[in-house]
Image: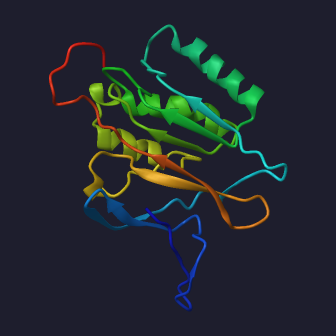
Amino acid sequence: MGAIGLQPDDGHCDAPPPELILMAGRLGDRQIQPAICRNTMMPVLRFRSNGRFRIVQLTDIHWAEGSRHMPRLCRIIESILDAEKPDLVVLTGDIVHSQAGSLDGCRKVTAPLAQRAIRWAAVLGNHDEEGDASRVEIASCLASLPFSLMQTGPAELGGTGNYFLDISASESSELSVRLHFVDSNSYSPLKSRGVD
């Protein structure tokens, strides 16, 4: 996968501006056509001047609307964010797990991030689509929320939420790290014994 920034006035290629990222490349023997992924809300991710970039991973939140555990879960997330002061938060699946209110759950889970102006990204897990919203609806909702860097990704890849984020050096636009986010889909079509 590659990222290309286009300058509309002269056609030169340069570092990608945050509002336009073209994704293209190969996946196995398949050529992936360019897909435009837009996020006009956020600047480029960049290492701090001390050379550090802190990522907090939140996984298996299982937001369940109406559960008595949700206020405590919010306090835990808020305390982690306040203690760690991350540059990026990554939600890695099973964000919501409720029969009703999945999209509202997405908004509530990410509210502490927006309140602190923390940029974040996400991939979906197998339980996210078990409520009242489809995988595409949940990914689209998450991608539209404040400070989200999530992208639904190229349709021809299969899955929802295949994308990458680049982190630049602190003092230049030079690429330092590329984070890949891949949707492993929900459940395997193969019958198996064991846990999900």
Q: Residue furthest top?
A: 68
Report whether residue 166 is seen.
Answer: yes
Nearer to the camera, 59 or 178? 178
Q: Residue furthest front?
A: 29
Whether 168 is drawn above or below 50: the answer is below
- Quadrant containing the N terminus is bottom left
Residue 133 percent across, percent down from the top left: 29, 34
Q: Is residue 126 above or below residue 23?
A: above
Residue 181 on image: x %, y %: 45, 45
Q: Residue at x 37, y 65 (%)?
A: 25
Horizontally, is 48 left or right of 4 in the view? right
85 and 96: which one is in front? 85
Number of numbered discs overlaid on the protein picture = 0
Q: Residue furthest right?
A: 50
Instruction: Name the foreground residue: 9 vs 22.
Output: 22
Whether 18 is drawn above or below 58: the answer is below
55 relative position to 165: left or right: right
Residue at the (72%, 45%) spot, across then down: 53
Image side of residue 50 versus residue 116, left or right: right
Q: Position of residue 140 (x, y in %)?
A: 38, 47
Q: Quadrant of the C terminus?
A: top left
- Rendered residue at 51%/68% (across/down): 20
> Is the image coloured rainbow, by chain, by secondary structure, or in one colour?
rainbow
Q: Residue at x 29, y 45 (%)?
A: 159
**Residue 139 picture quarter:** top left
Residue 41 screen position, x and y as percent: 59, 57
The reply to whether residue 42 is visible in this rendering is no
User: Which of the 4 image quadrants contains residue 171?
Assistant: bottom right
Q: Residue furthest bottom?
A: 10
